[in-house]
Amino acid sequence: MEKYDVKFKKKLGQNFLKDKNIVRRIVDTSGVNNSSLVVEVGPGGGIMTKELSAKAKNVLAYEIDSELESELALKLDGLSNVDILFQDFLEADIVSDVSNYTYEKLFFVSNVPYYITTPIILKLIKSNLHFDNIVMMVQKEVGERFSTKPGSREYGSITVLLNYFFDIKKEFFVSKKEFVPVPKVDSVVVSFKEKKKKLKVLNFDFFERIIRDSFQYKRKNIKNNLKQYDLNVINNVLKKYGYDLNVRAEMLNVDVFVDICNELWK
């Protein structure tokens, strides 16, 4: 079991993995190899970073807590293929940072701070970088929301948005007892593989807005949630899929939302 000589900060969501076997399983799941650049957020005590460095060509890690510098220097001593940037990943110019490396494949592998899970994924999407695989440890309930299907209670706007870009898979469960300090929730490792073929969206910002508006009131139907748009156009699209304006957003798959968006944008 890994031990850490650090003062954990709850406000930064610092819960570090202690079982190296779980870390190895995460890295093996990712498919990282010696031609790869891996981006990691929140290396913490370096247990994942160290394992990644053994498989990857280079590891680029972002750590917001500069007080972890001495711990990471100790744990990662001698690893010439690891670079730690002590800054907020959400403020970083990831495209510029990645351009400093040569690689054949790009990966994102991380036990991310749970309170910024969704912003991190959205940043990866909007970077327009093509990741061969994104593997993240997330809160169990969040993992369910990301990977669920239409018709379930967990299905929401983030589900639709992520499923437009990725094939999402829950890889394996991780108990909260595997962390130090022990968090209140269990976790799940989730992989996101970029879809090779997806429908074209005419305007992505408008597509994102349509999705969010569709789910703004979970108990209301499309007619009520999208009443500020042309309901005749929306109804004609819904008819193609066997629905009408009384359907709720959680019943519609991503293709329906793409069609609605494109027809409204024309």
Image (tube, rainbow, N blue to C red):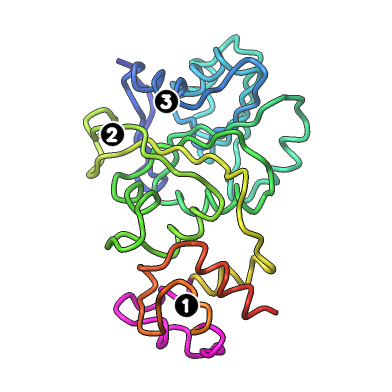
Alpha carbons under labels 3 and 1: distance apart: 40 Å
Q: Secondary structure at mark 1?
A: helix
Q: Is residue 224 magenta?
A: yes
Q: Is residue 72 magenta?
A: no
Determine the image quadrant of residue 149.
bottom left
Residue receiving disc 3: 26
Q: Residue at x 62, y 48 (%)?
A: 197
Q: Secondary structure at mark 3?
A: helix
Front tag of 3 and 1: 1
Q: Is residue 79 left or right of residue 238?
A: right
Q: Quadrant of the N terminus?
A: top left
Q: Amino acid at mark 2?
A: Phe
* First in sequence: mark 2 vs mark 3: 3
Q: Residue at x 67, y 78 (%)?
A: 265
Q: Residue at x 59, y 69 (%)?
A: 207
First to last magenta residue range: 212-234
Q: Is residue 24 left or right of residue 200?
A: left
Residue receiving disc 2: 173
Q: Amino acid at mark 3?
A: Ile
Label of residue 238 in the image:
1
Q: Residue at x 36, y 17 (%)?
A: 20
